[in-house]
Image: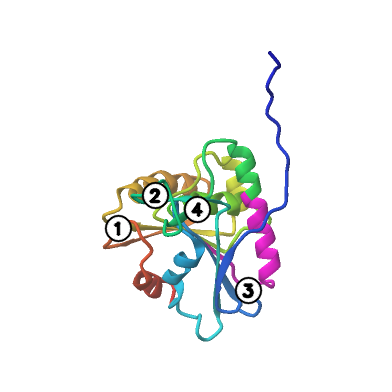
Amino acid sequence: MSRIREHSLRISRTARYAVCGDPATAPEPWFVLHGYRQLAGRFIHRFSDLPGISDGRRAVIAPEALNRFYIEREAAGPHGPGSRVGAAWMTRHDRDAEIRDYVDYLDRLRDHIATPADRLVVLGFSQGAETASRWAVLGGAPPDELILWGGGLAADLDQSQAAAALARTIVTFVVGDADRWARERAAAGLPLLERLGVETRRIEFPGGHRVEPEVLAVHWP
């Protein structure tokens, strides 16, 4: 029998993102990374009333993960025109290449859509939180604030590299009191970052595993 080998080939493909406000002129662009099974076009609605959007002070950019799939089945078959679609940032398969690809994608999107900003904010929700933390550490421009909402810091990040990249970044954990996963991730990430000398804060709210516009309005007026 012939020997079977796997190879990798880097290719170009089309990525999708949604925008609220004008990132070309807003001094504080927010990049918001959705969670598992979500899409950018729906996720960005959670930020449509973010303070500063209407007066041009802020703009929101929601990149969509490159791996899309059907998330429900219809009675007549595995999927069809009415089946919902979601996306994921990565799986455990070929993880190093997946991480490299989405870090490159997010860097290119930032450079493409946003002019140099006075303040850059990156928010990741659920699976998007670990994605956002990797981008902040491995990407080309660490944000001024990294918001990990309903998720935490990627456990595989090199601690020395994280300390250097996040030296001027505030890392905010946002935790719903009914969100056990977020509590566990914050409990692991906060003391680690504090030991590394990274500025942190923790915000708690009454609720579960979702982004709440009311919490955004209170803590980011």
Q: Amino acid at mark 4?
A: Ala
- Closer to the eye: label 1 or 3: 1
Residue 111 colored in magenta in the image: yes
Label annotation for residue 208: 1
Q: Residues within 10 Å of mark 2 (few under 14, many from 20)?
A: many
- Closer to the eye: label 2 or 1: 1
Q: Position of residue 165 (x, y in %)?
A: 62, 52
Q: Amino acid at mark 3?
A: Asp
- Closer to the eye: label 4 or 2: 4
Q: Is residue 131 above or below residue 16?
A: above
The residue tagged 3 is 118
Kindly indicate whether the residue at mark 1 contacts the one at mark 4 (C-beta within 8 angstroms): no
Measure the alpha-carbon separation of dots 4 and 3: 31 Å
What segment carries the magenta color?
Answer: 102-122
The residue tagged 4 is 87
The residue tagged 2 is 186
